[in-house]
Amino acid sequence: MGSPETNDDDRASELNLEAERYRHAAAHALEQLEWIVGYLRKLRKSELASALDHNRREILERIS
């Protein structure tokens, strides 16, 4: 059986990997949202695009 320190290190590693997966997923979702904002602007839905872009920027500020 491993030492408690090894178990703690393993758990910390798992948590770091999980956090990295969440960061990657969040970055990907924000990239998609940026694409949607551009698409809405091309469709001349500027009010909706601006609102979504504002929200996207707020999210970026909070997770940075």
Image (cartoon, rainbow, N blue to C red):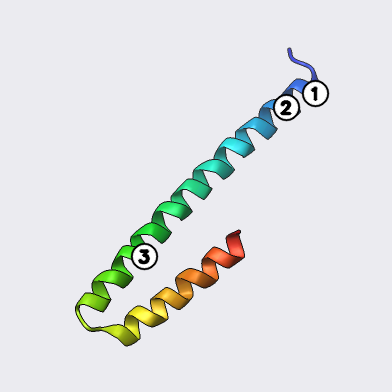
Circle 1 sits on which residue? 5
State which tag comes first along the sequence, 2 or 3: 2
Tell me whether the residue at label 2 lies in contact with that at label 3, contact meaning CB atoms closer than 8 angstroms. Answer: no
- Count of numbered circles in the view: 3
Q: Quadrant of the N terminus?
A: top right
Q: Which residue is mark 2?
A: 9
- For the residue pair 46 and 17, the one nearer the viewer reads as 46
**Residue 15 vertical position relative to residue 35 in the rendered view, above or below:** above
Left or right of 42 in this view: 55: right
Where residue 4 appears, x then y in whole percent? 80, 23
Q: Where does residue 24 sit, x and y in percent of width and height? A: 47, 46
Q: Is residue 51 above or below residue 31?
A: below
Residue on which disc 3 sits: 33
**Amino acid type of the residue tagged 1 in the rendering:** Glu
Crowd class of label 3 (few under 14; some 14 to 19; many from 20; radius 10 Å): some
Local secondary structure at mark 2: helix
Residue 40 % position (x, y): 26, 76
Give how far across and how far down residue 56 sits, in percent. Answer: 46, 69
**Amino acid type for the residue under numbered disc 2:** Asp
* SS state under label 3: helix
Helix, strand or loop under label 1: helix
* 12 shown above or below 21: above
